[in-house]
Amino acid sequence: MPGYSMESNPETTARAIGRDLPISPRHSEMICKQIRGWKLEKAKNYLADVVVLKSAVPDTRYKGCSHRKGKVGPGRFPKKAAGYILRLLEGAEANAEYKGLSIEGMVIMHISANPGRSYESYFRRARGRSTPKRRESVNVEVILRETKTKGE
């Protein structure tokens, strides 16, 4: 099993990884690009809004979709991918709590989506025929960093 793609200081960071998530690689890359460098609470609120279709994720690489409200430009609502990445962020937050890190100032230091395994199966067709289909999966890794608060 491959590890994380970035080294981090274990005393000030918490991390989580999701392997073979059944989501779109394109949608997961769009979300990761958008929330990289954000504070944890802001990212969690944003992903919760994406799941309920209140906020759109900008589509900067592929511009074949319509414009959305709120100064987003071309964008989409990847509900399924946003839900899985939100659960991953909550898992990383739980790991930070377990390590005794401060949750208030956590920042997404690193988040990336890489292609996972693709599963091959078949669509059943008429007259004993079949059509192959590939199901894609994604590996998403996140590293949260504790920032110093003003009181320290």
Image (tube, grey):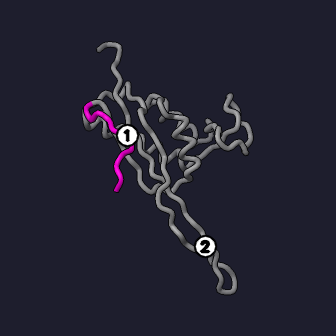
Give, as a single range, the part of the protein colored magenta. 1-11
Residue 110 location (% of width, % of height):
42, 36
Mark 1 belongs to which amino acid?
Met
- Dot 2 falls on a residue whose secondary structure is strand
Q: Is 19 rendered above or below residue 10?
A: below
Quadrant (top left, top right, bottom left, bottom right) of the C terminus: top left
Query: In the image, which disc is placed on residue 6?
Result: 1
Residue 146 location (% of width, % of height):
34, 27
Residue name at image x 55 percent, y 35 percent: 34
Mark 2 belongs to which amino acid?
Pro
Crowding around mark 1 (Cα neighbors within 10 Å: few <14, some 14 to 19, many 20+) is few
Q: Mark 2 points at which residue?
A: 132
The Cα–Cα distance between marks 2 and 1, rounded to whole angstroms, is 36 Å
Q: Which of 60 and 51 is in front in this view?
A: 60
Q: Which of 137 and 1 is in front in this view?
A: 1
Residue 111 location (% of width, % of height):
45, 39
Residue name at image x 67 percent, y 79 percent: 125
Residue 136 location (% of width, % of height):
53, 60
Residue 132 lies in quadrant: bottom right
